[in-house]
Structures are given as structure tokens and as C-alpha cells.
Image: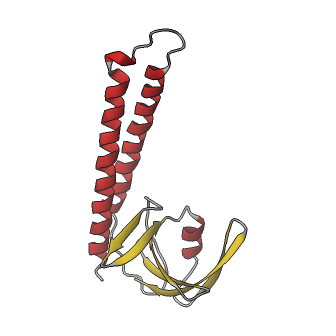
Amino acid sequence: MKKQALIDCICEVLETILQTAKDSALRAHETATHKESVAENKYDTFGLEASYLAHGQATRVKECEADLLAYQNLIGQDSKQKIVVGSLVTLADEKEKEHRFFLGPKAGGVKINFEAVDIMIVTPLSPLGSRLLECSVGDEFELKLGNNNRYYFVVSVR
């Protein structure tokens, strides 16, 4: 598995997300500025609500652009033992089921499929991501999620 190919795949997914956000922002802006959005009385808040939505969508576009830029500037470091930002990590849970995570700089929660493998992006700001930064191959750790404790074993780091 080539690290740069994985990063390129993530960029493609983020570009799709960005385009969807741009399309949504454009539609929200058009709705907010349409002549039918002008308030007919003091209780007609459609135009105001549409402008709030347009602002939120514009903010989302900026976030998506920042996510994409972070991955375009990410250098795929090959760390075989210690987990760092840019590592692809394989974990085994207590039932020995394997899970793959990419520790990225942004875009936590995005799922990708790369070389027929499902991978979830996590960031150092997430509970799992912050725990991963403390680990190396062969380490075991416990992660508390709500009322549940999950146990993981670090199988591999690429």
C-alpha cells in the first residue's frame, strides 16, 4: 500500500465533499437573495432563516477547503512502529475484529474505501486519535466511549 495513493484517495473524497458544500451554499444564497424571500410582515422570517442557512453553508465551505488543503500539504511519513499524524493504523478489538484508521490532521469522521478496505479518518482531537498518538505496534489500550469500555490492540502502523 502506497501512502501517497491513500492520501490522494482522501483528497478525492474531500474534493467531492467540498463540491457538495459549494453547491449547497450556492442554493442557500440564491434562496436568501430571491425576491420571494423578502418579508411580507414582521412575522415572516423565511428570508432571515435563509440568510442564516446561507451563512452556515458558507462557513462549511471554508471548513471543507481547510480540510482539503491540510491533506494536500500532508507528507506521507512511513512510521513502522510509532503512531504519528499520517499513520494508517490497524487495530484489533476484544473480539479480534480488525479496524483501520487513518490519523489525519483534519476531516475526522470521514470514511473512505481504499483498495477494498474501509478506513475511518480520526484526528488527534478525538478520544481515539489522542490515544493512538501514545501508542506503538503491540500496545494495548482501553477507550471509554459513553458507558462502554473498548479494548484495542495495535496490530500494525504504516
Front in this rendered view, residue 8 or 117: 117
Outermost residue, right side: 147
Front in this rendered view, residue 103 or 31: 31
Name which residue lies at 40% across and 14% down.
38
Q: Please, is residue 16 above or below residue 130 in the view?
A: above
All told, the count of numbered labels is: 0
Name which residue lies at 37% across and 50% down.
64
Residue 73 in view of the camera: no
Residue 21 in view of the camera: yes
The N terminus: image quadrant: bottom left
Percent of width and height locating residue 100: 45, 78
Determine whether, in the image, residue 75 is placed left or right of residue 143: left
Percent of width and height locating residue 26: 30, 35
Name which residue lies at 35% across and 45% down.
21
Determine whether, in the image, residue 17 is placed left or right of residue 122: left
Percent of width and height locating residue 31: 35, 27
Q: Please, is residue 128 above or below residue 82 in the view?
A: above
Residue 158 picture quarter: bottom left
Q: Please, is residue 35 above or below residue 119 in the view?
A: above
